[in-house]
Image: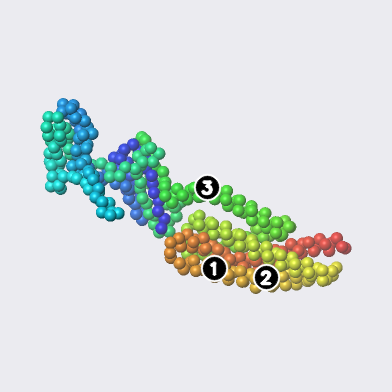
Amino acid sequence: MVKLDIKLYGKDSDGLQKVASKIERRLRDLKVTQSVFSDQASAGFFIDIDIDTEALQRYNITKSLIQEYTSAAIGGKKITTMYKGLERYPIALRFEEEERRNLDDIRNIQIKTPLGFVPLSTFAKVQYRESASVIKSEMATPVTFVYITPQQGMSVVTYKEEAMKALADLKMPAGYYFEWAGQSEYLESATEKMKWIIPTVLLVIFVLIYFALGDMVPTLIVFFTLPFALVGGLVYIQMLDFNMSIAVIVGFLALLGIAAETAIVMIVYLQESVDEMRAKEGSAFDYAHLDAAIYEGAVQRVRPKLMTVFAILAGLLPIMLTSGVGSEVMQRIAAPMIGGVVTSAVLSLLLIPIFFELYEKHLLKKELKETK
């Protein structure tokens, strides 16, 4: 399930809580939102001990002494360790619960001074205060998060567009701003990388096809028929209701490699068949012989191609039946390849022979004209 986060930066936890609540209310009203909630930055109640420094001076004691007494009385203080063989048990000392249960008891904690024992209330104001339960910061700035789950089937990009429209007129105090995080942030980073990875992969595939065939026209035939292999992948991910993601794109890139490989082998089979027919017929080689050679080369490729298709399907289909850790990513990589190898088979067995035959007939026509 897709999840998004909004990082909200600001000056203090109270302001962050107010702005985060506004964002939460606006996004909750969107139909594309399944759930949304923000960090409760000011949801904690604490005992606030506000020390009076002038009172400390009158009794000639330090602030650290007050802190030490209150810490030991309320939270406890380790005084020793009990050893039992290899086991170690820390021993702490603090007041009984009834002596620290409420503010009056805490105010009555006795502090030792040069003038005798004096209650804590003499040196400090003790009261409850609501404050941040968790203090978060990034880039030396207080931050809080808004956690979002879009509706099932909603892509990150589409949801982000809808959310930005809802937050377009949101007024925030000076010094407050937000940015997208979570899967959205990762997707944008990956998308930036894909902008140069995809063209690079296509260029490498084109160069490798040319190195394998050594002729520009057959190279172009193979390269520009590769998109037909993607049709099956697109249909299959649509049937599975998968959104376009980085994992799906990786699956399509892998599919292009498989389709290019099988198309190259088909071209090699056809070229060998045509060359054998030329050598056999010699100067009598004509269009009928070319058709027979193309047919023979394509038929020879049927069995290896079907073996390749079934081997790939046998290896990838079990992935679509798994439900363990990482299965969601693996399924989105495998799905384009499963659907694509089917249309890739049609590409290799039907389209490649047709285009290659048109190219060879063009060459044969020029050859016949020159011999006349």
Q: Is residue 364 visible?
A: yes
Please state which of the two labelled residues, at mark 3 or mark 1, is closer to the viewer.
Answer: 1
Kindly identify which residue carries mark 1. 315
Q: Using the image, tell me which numbered label, if any, was put on residue 301.
A: 2
Please state which of the two labelled residues, at mark 2 or mark 1, is closer to the viewer.
Answer: 1
Q: In which quarter of the image is residue 226?
A: bottom right
The C terminus, quarter of image: bottom right
Please tell me whether mark 3 sits on a helix, a strand or a loop.
Answer: helix
Whether residues under marks 3 and 1 lie with C-beta atoms below 8 angstroms apart, the answer is no
Please state which of residues 269 and 367 is positioned toward the viewer in this rendering: 269
The number of callouts visible is 3
Please tell me whether mark 2 sits on a helix, a strand or a loop.
Answer: helix
For marks 2 and 1, the one nearer the N-term is 2
Q: Can residue 170 be seen in this view?
A: no
Amino acid type of the residue tagged 2 in the rendering: Arg
Q: In which quarter of the image is residue 15?
A: top left
Amino acid type of the residue tagged 3 in the rendering: Glu
Q: Residue at x 67, y 56 (%)?
A: 208
Question: In the picture shown, does residue 362 fall above or below 16?
Answer: below
Please state which of residues 168 and 116 is positioned toward the viewer in this rendering: 116
User: Within 10 angstroms of label 1, few (less than 14), some, or many (20 or more) residues?
Assistant: few
The N terminus, quarter of image: bottom left
Please state which of residues 113 and 2 is positioned toward the viewer in this rendering: 113
Question: In the picture shown, does residue 1 fall above or below 27?
Answer: below
Alpha carbon of mark 2 to alpha carbon of mark 1: how far? 21 Å
Kindly identify which residue carries mark 3. 192
Q: Quadrant of residue 135?
A: top left
Q: Which residue is drawn at 20% across and 33% down?
A: 51
Alpha carbon of mark 3 to alpha carbon of mark 1: how far? 31 Å
Q: Which residue is drawn at 39% across and 49% down?
A: 5
Alpha carbon of mark 2 to alpha carbon of mark 3: how far? 40 Å
For marks 2 and 3, the one nearer the N-term is 3
